Image (spheres, rainbow, N blue to C red):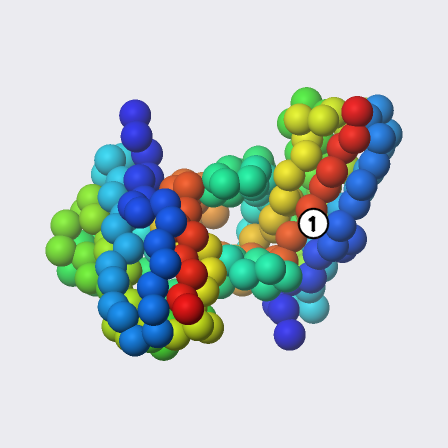
């Protein structure tokens, strides 16, 4: 059982470049989300989706786009990378949207460096 | 400012010692979760608490949700090197809202 799979594991971009971070889950979860993790800041929500075709902004959405064309996939697009987007990015899913008895299942992260 | 504060930020102890880490807020939460994250991996859920005053035990780990549902604590008895990691608390202010994460407590248990 793969759970939540993120690719790539590491990525280096130059300022202004664009790229897509991939996230796939095989648990048929309704809810998917993207977080970034920075030292001393915890995990901050970028975008989330409560089902296929539905996305919404989180706490720090600027500079990122998402789409949810299928239940399984939730890619995160960086439109024009900036050094401030250097971070570790985590994708997470859960059975139901923010149900208190539905834990978040995280992928192993993508470490992104923007130079 | 963080909605959830965690203390201490760093903690280094010897194997066999007891410890408590804290998660505090000025806001009331409908539920609160604790996660542990190891280097190079994503966080993994340890427990969810939903009732004020609730105490849950997971082997050597004891979790408590404050009576007012604004704070929580995690107590580890007889820490082991395998307990080393980043401990994160996450709270949902209302049912149906996204979870907000604290900055974490980084625990090192030395042999």
Q: Is residue B97 something that shows in the picture?
A: no
Image coordinates for residue B82, horizontal then vertical, percent: 66, 26
* Secondary structure beneath label 1: strand
Query: Of all residues shown, which one is farthest toward the left?
Result: A69
Q: Quadrant of the C terminus of chain B?
A: top right
Identify the residue at horizontal 38%, vertical 49% (top origin).
A10
Viewer-side residue, B105 vs A8: A8
B87 left or right of B100 in image: right
Is B65 rendered above or below residue A45? above
Is B90 rendered above or below residue B54? below
Image coordinates for residue A59, horizontal then vertical, percent: 44, 71
Q: How many marks?
A: 1
Q: Quadrant of the N terminus of chain B?
A: bottom right
Is B78 rendered above or below residue B29? above
Q: Is residue B56 something that shows in the picture?
A: yes
Identify the residue at horizontal 71%, vertical 56% (top origin).
B6
Residue corresponding to mark 1? B105
Viewer-side residue, B7 vs B111: B111
Dot 1 alpha-carbon crowd within 10 angstroms: few under 14, some 14 to 19, many 20 or more = many
A66 left or right of B82 in image: left
Image coordinates for residue B31, horizontal then vertical, percent: 56, 51
Give the quarter of the image for residue B46: top right
Q: Chain of mark 1?
A: B
Identify the residue at horizontal 34%, vertical 69% (top origin).
A14
Give the quarter of the image for residue B74: top right
Is B81 rendered above or below residue A92? above
Image coordinates for residue A45, horizontal then vertical, percent: 43, 63
């Amino acid at each position: 059982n793969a759970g939540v799979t993120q690719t790539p594991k590491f990525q280096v971009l130059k300022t202004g470049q664009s790229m897509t971070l991939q996230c796939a889950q095989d648990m048929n979860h309704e809810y998917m989300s993207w977080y970034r993790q920075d030292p001393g800041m915890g995990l901050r929500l970028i975008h989330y989706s409560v089902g296929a075709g539905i996305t919404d902004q989180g706490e720090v959405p600027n500079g990122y786009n998402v789409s949810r064309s299928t239940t399984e996939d939730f890619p995160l697009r960086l439109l024009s990378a900036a050094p401030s987007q250097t971070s570790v990015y985590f994708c997470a899913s859960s059975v139901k949207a923010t149900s208190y008895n539905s834990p978040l299942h995280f992928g192993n992260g993508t470490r992104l460096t923007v130079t | 400012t963080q909605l959830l504060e965690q203390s201490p930020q760093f903690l280094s102890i010897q194997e066999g010692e007891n410890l408590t880490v804290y998660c505090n807020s000025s806001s009331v939460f409908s539920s609160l979760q604790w996660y542990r994250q190891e280097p190079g991996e994503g966080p993994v859920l340890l427990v969810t608490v939903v009732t004020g005053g609730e105490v849950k035990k997971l082997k050597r780990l004891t979790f408590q949700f404050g009576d007012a549902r604004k704070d929580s604590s995690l107590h580890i008895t007889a820490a082991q090197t395998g307990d080393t990691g980043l401990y994160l608390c996450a709270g949902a202010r209302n049912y149906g809202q996204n979870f907000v994460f604290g900055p974490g407590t980084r625990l090192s248990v030395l042999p």
